[in-house]
Image (spheres, helix red, strand yellow):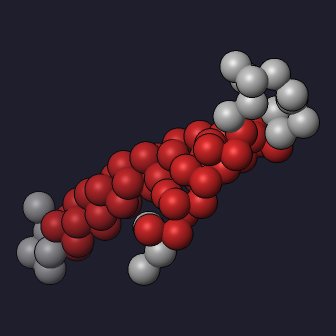
Amino acid sequence: MDSDGTSNQLCYQILSVIGSLGPSVVFGYKGILLIFGIFMTYETQSVRLKQVNDSRFVGMSIYKVVAMNQK
C-alpha cells in the first residue's frame, strides 16, 4: 500500500463505478420494457376483436406509470 493513499483512492473509484452500474442496468431494463409496451399498444390499437382490444387500457396504464414517476 502506498503511503500517500493512491491505492485507496483507486479502490474507491472502482467501487463507485461498480455501485452506479447496478441501478443503471435496472432502469435501462425497465425502460426497454416500457418502450416495448408502448410499441405493442400502438400495434394493437386497430384490432376490432372485443377479446383482444384492450390497447386503450394498456395505453392509460403506461401513461399512469410515466406520469406518476416524474420527479
In the image, what residue occupies the spot 55% across and 50% down?
61
Which percent across, then down, holds residue 29? Answer: 53, 42
- Compare residues 37 and 64 and report the one nearer the observer: 64
In the figure, is residue 15 to the left or right of 69? left
Q: Can I make out residue 53 in this image?
A: yes
Image: 33 above or below 47: below
Q: Quadrant of residue 1?
A: bottom left
Disc tally is 0
Q: Can I make out residue 36 in this image?
A: no
- Compare residues 58 and 9 and report the one nearer the observer: 58
In the figure, is residue 8 to the left or right of 65? left
Which percent across, then down, holds residue 37? Answer: 66, 40
Image: 60 above or below 33: below
Which percent across, then down, holds residue 36? Answer: 69, 39
In the figure, is residue 61 to the left or right of 3? right
Q: Quadrant of residue 19?
A: bottom left
In the image, what residue occupies the spot 38% across and 54% down?
23
- Compare residues 62 and 19 and report the one nearer the observer: 62
Residue that sits furthest to the right in the current view: 46
Which percent across, then down, holds residue 30? Answer: 51, 46
- Compare residues 33 and 16 and report the one nearer the observer: 33
